[in-house]
Amino acid sequence: MQLFEKLIDYPEAERLALKNTPRLPVVWTPLEEAQGLALAEDVRAEFDSPPFDSSAVDGYAVRSVDTEVGRIFPVVDEAPAGRPAQKVVGEGEAIKIFTGGVIPEGADATVMVENTSGWGAEFELKKAASPGQNVRSAGEDVQKGEVILRAGTEIGPPEIALAATQGYAELPIYRKPRVAIFSTGSELVEPGARELSPGEIYDSNSFALLAQARESGADVRRIAAATDDADALHAAMEEALMSADVVVTSGGVSVGEKDLVKSTLLELGVMQVFWGVKLKPGKPVFFGTREDALLFALPGNPVSAMVCFELFVRPVIMRMMGREDKHRPRTEVYFDEDVENRFGRMHAMRVNLEWTEKGWKAESVGAQGSGLVSSLTKADALALIGPESEGVRAGEPIEAIVLREEVIIRPVSKGAEMPIS
Ligand code: AMP
Ligand code: MG
């Protein structure tokens, strides 16, 4: 089996992955399905909104110059919402109007019914009105041609409301990437299928990666695990590559004799972009492309697979969807004691975070073995301890990728201020 030619640094690997990531085509997506996605293009107002002058209250439309207290107004017509009056408001006249009704020609104000003697064929005015009073003017919300929603904006309830006021039933959004996920390894058994025989383990990676890809917003499909057999791998790989924008596999990508994933990919015409990163956990990670499809072959160790997804696959999915704004927050952290790194690779260390007067204090979650799935359930962040360093000194600031955002936005005691990058 081939050995690693050369390992590259993590920032270079991430750069190469993003450089090879295409944006997906823009699709006009129904408002009901657009929530939580981001706009691919600016959206402009098609017309002034609101489209006409309307009443903000229930009452009478009048000419403000006529509004002397004590005057009796004959009511000549009515203007409920959705049905403009037929008549115009002449001198000393009024038209009954309801909230949202079109201000009739001749009128320039609405008096609230509360400021009159009440509903009837005529009324006595109790309070004068100024020009424009209780009138919502055409175009006061948005004006024709104005950009109402910017590309990149996340679509939430207010954005949906604004789009609908302009008659948009759909919004332009990058198509969600189709991600296919499968595990490789002859020792793997589908959870729930049966008891394990000696040497077997349950396949956890495909579920973990499925969940991570879903959390990133992709359309995800899980394919049954392939055994460490060239034909099985070939078939599973080809099926995945045919139907997905991004294929994510785990296992079989290191330098063991049974590690056939890389050679199978090359046979299938995948162009290698990198294989081997100065990273712990995750050294054997492979990334390649075939036409517009991207392929990540992640190592089989469960923590390595999930960390590699965080570091490489998630940013790629975000880029495809125009969601660079959704990158995990990064923050400076320090350790209370010296931490060694003798691996010659960047250590993405699973840590807990605690806010202190000196900033975010990181503490290892405990053993850092790449098979320790339970360790990830305890981690708030990945502290990035550089490949060139021997480690970090107590108190020295380093960068961390925050996995649980709620940890850094949760209000802290002691009224301390929190930096959020
Ligand atoms: P590999 O990268 O194939 O050499 O696998 C490294 C380690 O990860 C081995 O102990 C595998 O049994 C384990 N492993 C590989 N794939 C999975 C998986 N899908 N779920 C859980 N553990 C796995
Ligand atoms: Mg294996």
Image (cartoon, helix red, strand yellow):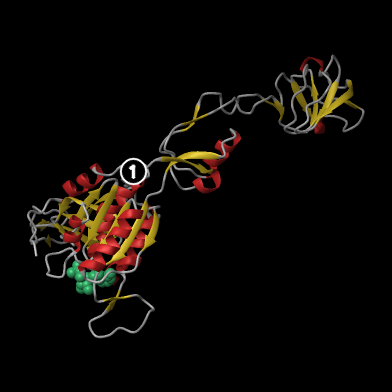
Question: Can residue 33 be seen here?
Answer: yes
State the residue in front, 358 or 194: 194
Question: Can residue 367 be seen here?
Answer: no
Q: Which residue is mark 1?
A: 324
State the residue in front, 402 or 21: 21
Residue at 30 percent across and 67 percent down: it is 205
Ligand 2 position by quadrant: bottom left
- Residue 193 falls left or right of residue 123: left
Does the numbered disc 1 mark a residue whose Cβ is under 8 Å from ligand 1?
Answer: no
**Residue 126 drawn above or below residue 207:** above
- Residue 267 position in % (x across, y down): 18, 57
Residue at 32 percent across and 67 percent down: it is 377
- Residue 1 position in % (x across, y down): 9, 65
Check disc 1 and give the amino acid type: Glu
**Residue 205 drawn above or below residue 47:** below
- Residue 109 position in % (x across, y down): 75, 22
Residue 260, picture quadrant? bottom left
